[in-house]
Image (tube, grey):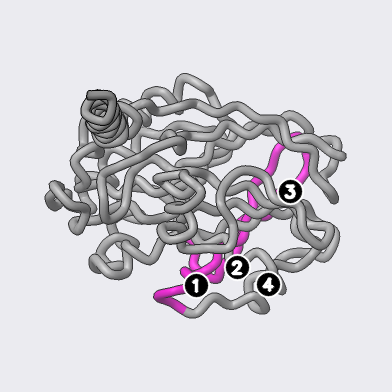
Amino acid sequence: MRLAVGAAAATAGAVVGAAYAGIVEPRRLRIRRLTLRLPRWPQRLDGLRVAVIADLHAGGPHVDEDRIEQIVGRVNGERPDLVVLLGDYVDPNVILGGEVAPEDVADRLADLRAPLGVFAVLGNHDWRSGGERVRRTLREWGIEVLENDAASVQRGGEVLYIVGLADLREREPDTDMPFALVPERAPLIVLSHDPDMFPRVPERASLTLAGHTHGGQVNLPLIRRRMIPSRYVAGTVDEDGKRMFISRGVGETHLPLRLAAPPEVAILRLKSS
């Protein structure tokens, strides 16, 4: 009798856990507000607020055009100075999902508002789903896409440089040419879809921003290492005198599940160390 009751309880727990991971947590978007103290960061840029949106994977059952529109509204409500988009905008291969056109994604993202602009890199799933179309569409909707390139913005008389690197798994990232465009002592933020680029980022970068990992997506010790596509997981990483922030992202890849790794948009307040 006790065995039967225990088995029934275990089965019920598994059903509840599966329902939570498949229905509840993937839709519990968290606005994560953090203050990061950075090396090589000028005091004139103290307080700069950067919104980080990663891994939409639009087409999955939890991310459609309406949800992207809701996310854009929440980000705009935070009034960031700068918005960065870290790739994997579309993904028609999530189980139980479908196809969302890059044009529909870009149309919603075009409503993002930040005085210093919106900058993007592409991810591996974008290139597997027609990367040139994704890149062209984002640019047509006014979003600056960087691939092994640099851009600059100004705030309070200080020039901030942004380098965007090509995807590590589907393209050829160049860590020489884009950094040659940045003055040696200038404040610098690096955008990389894949955090495994971090060891190749020069030490003079103030901050590297990445996605790709989904925080493990199913963040249980025995499962996470099988699902995570990187030696990094999520959050802030300090390594070799450099700092990186990895977003858990919004959507899911392969399986439309999240457990102990809720979707997030990060609002980072940057200050000098």
Q: Which residue type carries mark 1?
A: Leu
Q: Nearer the viewer, mark 2 or mark 3?
A: 2
Q: Which residues are magenta?
A: 146-171
Is there CB contact under 8 Å for labels 4 and 1?
A: no
* Residue 5, picture quadrant: top left
Residue position marked by numbered label 2 in the rendering = 197
Q: Which residue type carries mark 3?
A: Val
Residue furthest toward the top?
77
Q: Which residue type carries mark 4?
A: Arg
**Image height check: is 105 above or below 167?**
above
- Sooner in the amino-acid sequence: mark 2 or mark 3: 3
Horizontal and vertical percent position of residue 225: 49, 58
SS class, disc 3? strand
Residue position marked by numbered label 4 in the rendering = 200
Residue position marked by numbered label 1 in the rendering = 168
- Sooner in the amino-acid sequence: mark 4 or mark 3: 3
Image quadrant where one finds the N terminus? top left
Residue drawn where x is 68% and y is 43% of the image? 154
Is there CB contact under 8 Å for labels 2 and 4?
A: yes
Residue position marked by numbered label 3 in the rendering = 159
Q: Residues within 10 Å of mark 1 (few under 14, many from 20)?
A: some
Q: Which residue type carries mark 2?
A: Met
Horizontal and vertical percent position of residue 100: 17, 49
Q: Residues within 10 Å of mark 4 (few under 14, many from 20)?
A: few
Q: Which one is in front, 249 or 42? A: 249
